[in-house]
Image (tube, helix red, strand yellow):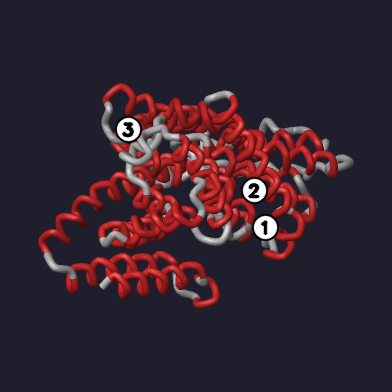
Amino acid sequence: MTAFIIIVFIAGYLAIAFEHPIKINKAASALLTGVVCWSIFALLGNDRELVSEDLAHHLSAIAGILFFLLGAMVIVELIDAHDGFEVITQRITTTSKRKLVWIVGLLAFFLSAVLDNLTTTIVMVSLLRKVIPSHKDRLVFAGLIVISANAGGAWSPIGDVTTTMLWIGNQITTANIVLKTIVPSLVCFFVPALVISIKMKGKLERIEQQKNLLKSTPYERRTVFIIGISSLLFVPVFKTITHLPPYMGIVFGLGMMWVLTEMVHSAKDESEKGLFSVNHALRKIDTPSILFFLGILLAVSALESTGVLASIAKALDNSIGNISIITIIIGFLSAIVDNVPLVAAAQGMYSLEQYPTDHFFWEFLAYCSGTGGSILIIGSAAGVAAMGMERIQFGWYLKKIAWLAVIGYLAGAAVFLLQHYLLNL
């Protein structure tokens, strides 16, 4: 039985990894993999009732992640529908390439901690098109955005889906993950940004800005932007006050934003406020990504319930032994393989009894899995988004940006280990 499940999981994983060559959406492959793994477990296992109980137990945790992602996506879509991000982009006026490296990098770093690395990349690459006419220059800046968005998402419980998974799973707490990983994440961004800024010379030719046909009024843009960002920032506060799961905080924030946006547009008729409604935002969100997470998390939970992950953990401990090296390797693997199943697997391999909440391992895992994906353009959702928007070639990124991502990743990892072993942080 276990062998069959492993074979199905590997086949599904390969289908996900080669999504573009085989022309099958990774969400479809993930859903089939998850269902088939559990079906084999139910059909060949000894107790089907026990299998159903195991599935129900895992599904409650998976649902928490999915509802959190759904709520966050809708909030971000509402902000975007109201042109809320114009509040930020219209303030960038410099023509110095070196200054722009730091403005764009720092903005992506901190913005991704509040939104997420994928949304931040989309917003920032869209911004680049408004201020940088040269496609060649934009490619370098897009590579910087991938690195800085992934680094920024790693230190925030709502900045990267893997950090969110660890937060929801009680492996980390908000204050601790920020304290332990913000400096290493900043170093991970700072080192590549420094190299890029040294190489950057000259000034940009300003694009003659056309009057944007914005759909919203300045009042609506500012109001919805403030409400949306406040809703996202309130989630950790809500969890601390109520001790309820994070998805309850995001659902509360979405509910409040829904009410307030309805009030903002109360004087308009239905046809006028259609594009600004939550209903419209729900139609625009990336539903396939949510289904992908559902499928892959179901598949990984099947491996956990059958004891496969526990066996892998023992094998890694016996062959390598050093948990720091294991975690760094996971970070490098996340550049090749999606970091969501890697982190889900780690959560199944190592229990909270072995590594309790806020243990060094979970914090280091959040950093490595979040930033390691920058090493290859296909290693993170942020990279894939930038690749599609700016037509970045895999080989170009490997030659020009990958080595910068590697030194940033290793520099940040070194700082994290120094903090832990020398400063006892």
Residue 205 visible within the image: yes
**Residues at discs 1 and 2 in contact (Cβ within 8 Å):** yes
Q: Earlier in the sequence, mark 1 or mark 3?
A: 3
In this view, the residue in front, 199 or 359, is: 359
Residue under label 1:
390
Residue found at the very far top of the displayed protein: 241
Residue under label 2:
125
In this view, the residue in front, 263 or 52, is: 52
In this view, the residue in front, 314 or 377, is: 314
Residue found at the very far right of the displayed protein: 202
Cα distance, mark 1 to mark 2? 8 Å
Q: Amino acid at mark 3?
A: Gly
Left or right of 400 on screen, residue 379? left
Q: Position of residue 341 (x, y in %)?
A: 42, 56
Within 10 Å of the Cα at label 2, are there few (<14), some (14-19), or many (20+) other Cα atoms?
many
Within 10 Å of the Cα at label 1, are there few (<14), some (14-19), or many (20+) other Cα atoms?
some
Q: Amino acid at mark 1?
A: Glu
Q: Amino acid at mark 2?
A: Val
Cα distance, mark 3 to mark 2? 29 Å
In the displayed structure, 18 sits above or below 284; it is below
The kind of secondary structure element at disc 2 is helix
